[in-house]
Amino acid sequence: MCRFSRFLWAGAVCLLLAFSGMQVAVADEFSGLESGQFNTIANTVSALVASGNSQAGAVIDALGKRHLFYSPAGGVFIRSGSTYVDARTGQFVQNTPADLKPVRMNNYVRQVLASANAELELLSPQDAVRLKAATQMYAQHNPVMLPAINHALALEKNSRVRLKLEQASAAIVLAQPMKTGDEASRLAAVKALGSAADLEARGVLSAVAMSDHETAEVRKAAADTVSSIDLKQRLWSILQNAFYGLSYGSVLLLAATGLAITFGVMGVINMAHGELMMIGAYTTWMVQQGIRATVLWLEPVSLLVAIPVAFCVCGLLGILIERGLIRFLYGRPLETLLATWGLSLILQQAIRSIFGPTNIAVVTPAWLSGSWMLGSVDITLNRLAIFVFAFLVLAALMLIMRKTSLGLEMRAVTQNRRMAALMGIRTPRVDALAFGLGAGLAGLAGVAVSQIDNVSPNLGQSYIIDSFMVVVFGGVGNLWGTLAAAMTLGMGGKILEPTIGAVSAKISILVLVILYIQRHPRGMFPVRGRGVES
């Protein structure tokens, strides 16, 4: 009896220990990862996310990268380089078990893992991380993500993230086949998705509108929403093209201000002005290459260094051209036009012989790369910087024209050259400096255009005709007219291009300018003065 009693006690203790061990195994969120059953592993992943354990993110990340291992003797480990850390504690393991095996994966576990990753990101304390995760789910509209999205929606306070989550949920609902009694939820999803008004939403709604499995009411709501999205997309497209037109108009403004000065002061039709732009762009490239080869730490600001260098190089070249060629042809506009046209061909060939006929790559610095969305308009930093740069140059030029003796003399020569000469102004000097200033501005235009266009020996040909149109349309020698004409032609052309094509847009703009000049021969802002009037 005594022996039997001891046997019962021993059996009870063993059962108690076994039961206790089982309780510990069940209480541990990580123990399921040691199982060979895929369902157990998948359930463990879901339980880890729901537990809020601080190690959950590291474990799920390691499982996705196949860096998660377990020992049949017990223990889950994360490989970190050549060492291992305990998955439960995050502490480095001194004596790693020799029998480690990778935690098993199959497609079901991968799906659960993707949902777990998404849920972890949706529960991040950072708004930007949650918004990025919601945006990715919206683009994927994967049904596996729906529980995670609904869970996040119940907790989300940020209005932007919440809106994107609602749109992601709506996209997932509509991407799935319709079920009986599902009409109300699908109508709500159509309404929610309509707030997105982007191509992703349009694609989902178009499929719903054309589906034979949807009710007539859902199809009609989807079709109406698609029409509304199309209208909004057209409006956003116009705004996007208007933004591109602003940057193109800014380049035209930089190029045409130089022409406005030389043509307005000297009456010279400089056909080599586009090639001066091209030299400005090549100077930018040479400055970048020189800085990269000598003072590497200046590379992030090489574009800023190129601005004064290009202005000086092109300005000095302009003075050289005026002194060596233009001054012998004053009063003979046809010969001047032919001479500068020949000069433009010489400059093109010289650049082609030195640098080759192919395009060169002017690197956009990191601080000018990237963009942000304003509604559905993609605002790129380099185009925005060109816009700001053009207005800064215009403001500086107006200060020069109004506040310096050079500007006063140039305005005097513009108004009446003979009278200015009689008043003691050295008109040849003013001519040389004015030509140099106009050439320097062309160099600045070359720096700007190097960020949005190909740099090649033919670069100037793309802008010279438009630049002359800006000068004539705005009013010869008037900077305000140049500004208005550059923006009008730049934006007008870019807005018309998607509708009627690039060539037709240019022809239309040219016809409109000709018609306007017929009625207003001196442009939008004519320069007044006795010399000009005569």
Image: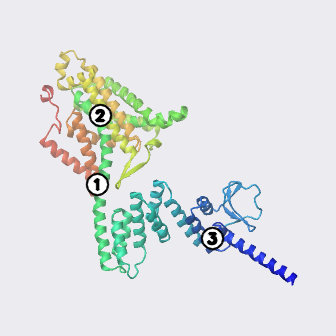
Dot in front, 3 or 1: 3
**How many residues crowd around disc 1 within 10 Å: few (fewer than 14), some, or many (20 or more)?**
some
Kind of residue sitting beneath label 2: Leu
Q: Residue furthest front?
A: 2
Sequence-earlier tag: 2 or 3: 3
Residue 154 falls left or right of residue 388: right
Residue where numbered disc 3 is placed: 41
Q: Residue at x 65, y 74 (%)?
A: 37
Give the numbered dot on residue 238.
Answer: 1
Circle 1: element type: helix
Kind of residue sitting beneath label 1: Ile
Give the numbered dot on residue 394.
Answer: 2
Question: Is residue 244 placed above or below 423 in the rendered structure?
Answer: below
Q: Position of residue 16 (x, y in %)?
A: 74, 75
Distance CA(mark 1)–CA(mark 2): 27 Å
Distance CA(mark 2)–CA(mark 3): 66 Å
Circle 2: element type: helix
Inspect this view and state whether residue 274 appears: no
Question: Is residue 443 placed above or below 193 in the rendered structure?
Answer: above
The colour scheme applied to this rendered structure is rainbow
Out of 212 and 52, give the one closest to the viewer.
52
Circle 3: element type: helix
Tag 2–tag 3 contact (CB < 8 Å): no
Q: Residue at x 26, y 52 (%)?
A: 505
